[in-house]
């Protein structure tokens, strides 16, 4: 199985109270993700991010973009992303 891709969808504009308008990560969260080594930690981070996006709102576009990224990299998205895609 391929590695869990970064949740970043290459928008990188921090306009929503320090959160990226593309993926909802803060600059600190982006740095944290880059430092994660274990696959389980990366998957847990993406799961947390899906919950963060639901709480913040305005991030429905991210799920489709991230699913395309996973497909391109031949990676299986974490269950929270698959569930969010089904709900959309």
Image: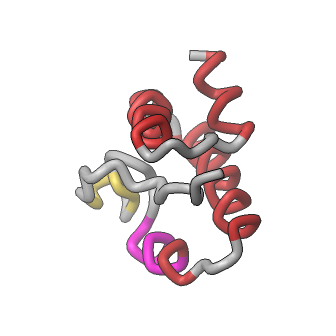
Nearest the viewer among 83 and 54 is: 83
Q: Note whether residue 81 is visible.
A: yes
Nearest the viewer among 54 and 79 is: 79
Residue 37: where, in percent of width, then height? 63, 80
Left or right: where 10 falls relative to 58: left
Point 23% across, 57% down: residue: 13
Nearest the viewer among 40 and 50 is: 40
Magenta residues, as a range? 26-32
Seen as rendered, the residue at the extreme front is 1
Residue 48: where, in percent of width, then height? 68, 55
Point 43% across, 67% down: residue: 26
Residue 3: where, in percent of width, then height? 58, 59
Q: Quadrant of residue 20?
A: bottom left
Q: Examine the structure image and report whether residue 52 is included in the region drawn in magenta.
A: no
Q: Quadrant of residue 75?
A: top right
Point 45% across, 60% down: residue: 25
Point 64% across, 17% down: residue: 86
Left or right: where 43 falls relative to 14: right
Q: How many numbered discs?
A: 0
Seen as rendered, the residue at the extreme bottom is 35
Q: How is the image coloured?
A: secondary structure
On-image quarter of the C terminus: top right
- Say above or below: 51 vs 58: below
Q: Main secondary structure of the magenta part?
A: helix
Q: Quadrant of residue 69?
A: top left
Q: Note whether residue 58 is visible.
A: no
């Amino acid at each position: 199985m391929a590695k869990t891709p970064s949740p970043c969808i290459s928008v990188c504009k921090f306009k929503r109270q320090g959160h990226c308008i593309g993926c909802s990560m803060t600059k600190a969260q982006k740095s944290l993700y880059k430092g994660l080594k274990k696959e389980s930690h990366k998957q847990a981070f993406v799961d947390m991010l899906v919950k963060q996006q639901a709480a913040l709102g305005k991030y429905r576009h991210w799920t489709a973009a991230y699913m395309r990224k996973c497909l391109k990299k031949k990676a299986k998205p974490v269950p929270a992303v698959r569930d969010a895609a089904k709900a959309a």
